[in-house]
Amino acid sequence: MAEANEKRPKFRRKYIQLISALVYNANIKGFSDGVIYFGNLKGVCVPGLNCYSCPGAVASCPLGSLQNAVASSGRTIPFYIIGTLLLFGALFGRFICGFLCPFGLIQELLYKIPSPKLKKNKVTRKLSCLKYIILAVFVVILPLMFAYPGFCKYICPAGTLEAGIPLMMYDETIAALRGALFNWKAAVLAAVVIGAVIVYRGFCRFICPLGAIYSFFNHITIVGVTVDEAKCTKCGHCVRMCKMDIKNVGDRECISCGECMDVCPEDAVYWKLRRKSTDTETKQEETSL
């Protein structure tokens, strides 16, 4: 196993996560003057959760865009944002959660703080279903019935951290409007932050509706992890070591972080693209023979 793992190219996931966060929030001037960017790029969605109103944000959040589209469309289908989510989902699925989401990176860094840790168990596996309920209620039903973005308004901790707090610090007028709703959102953010110290990516696992959307595509994505069934001995080591609530590598809870590759005793876990490349090379060799 060690020899095989040494030959496999290593992906520095934290670097990719950091670069993604910087690209999403490339409006450096916004951080200095507290002004939101409203340029043409705001008509484009980034793959991960990143608040539209963050002073540094140069593009839109797909989850916020979906809620606003549902709220404003009435009975009209919001083809653009649905098409965008379908594209991101089909290409990457929850690989986006593992590599391209700034709020996921924040949670992973918080988890490194020394503290008692709650390991995954039967309860956390059941709680992982909660994000689908939140998706249905706060992202679809409330925007559709009452025409406002329920998740952004009442829950999203990324919006509070990236937009609410910074804008209040910059603008006294906005700070003067602080009331019960902001206090509630601040309490939600505090709970998520504390939870992230104790539970690995708790927001991603139990709450995030964007991860819920991408999870539906995990079995068909072009990018992600897969298992070579011919090599796999069903030892279950990959599932046991995974901090997410997966039942199998590549299922709806898998964020394709790739850490299971390094612990597989049979070297049976691959990147999908690498596996396809290997299969193509094998077929070519067989044809040449």
Image: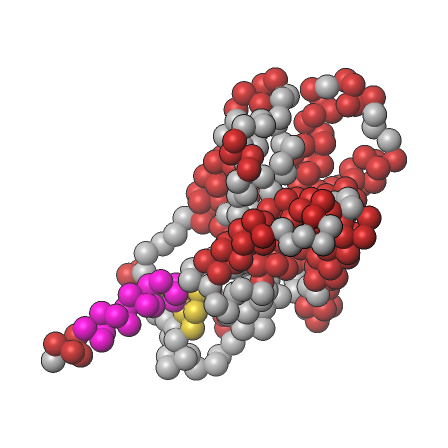
Q: Is residue 238 magenta?
A: no
Q: Residue at x 51, y 76 (%)?
A: 236
Residue 123 position in % (x across, y down): 73, 68
Question: Which quarter shows the N terminus?
Answer: bottom left
Instruction: Specify start and end residues of the magenta stretch as a single range.
Output: 270-284
Asked where in the image residue 50 lies, by quadrant, the reply is top right
Horizontal arrangement in the rendering, residue 68 relative to residue 12 (left or right): right
Q: Residue at x 29, y 65 (%)?
A: 277
Q: Residue at x 52, y 65 (%)?
A: 218
Q: Front-most of 26 and 140?
A: 140
Q: Residue furthest front?
A: 76
Q: Residue furthest left?
A: 289
Q: Is residue 139 visible?
A: no
Question: Which quarter shows the C terminus?
Answer: bottom left
Q: Residue at x 33, y 63 (%)?
A: 274
Q: Residue furthest right?
A: 180
Above or below 80: residue 218? below
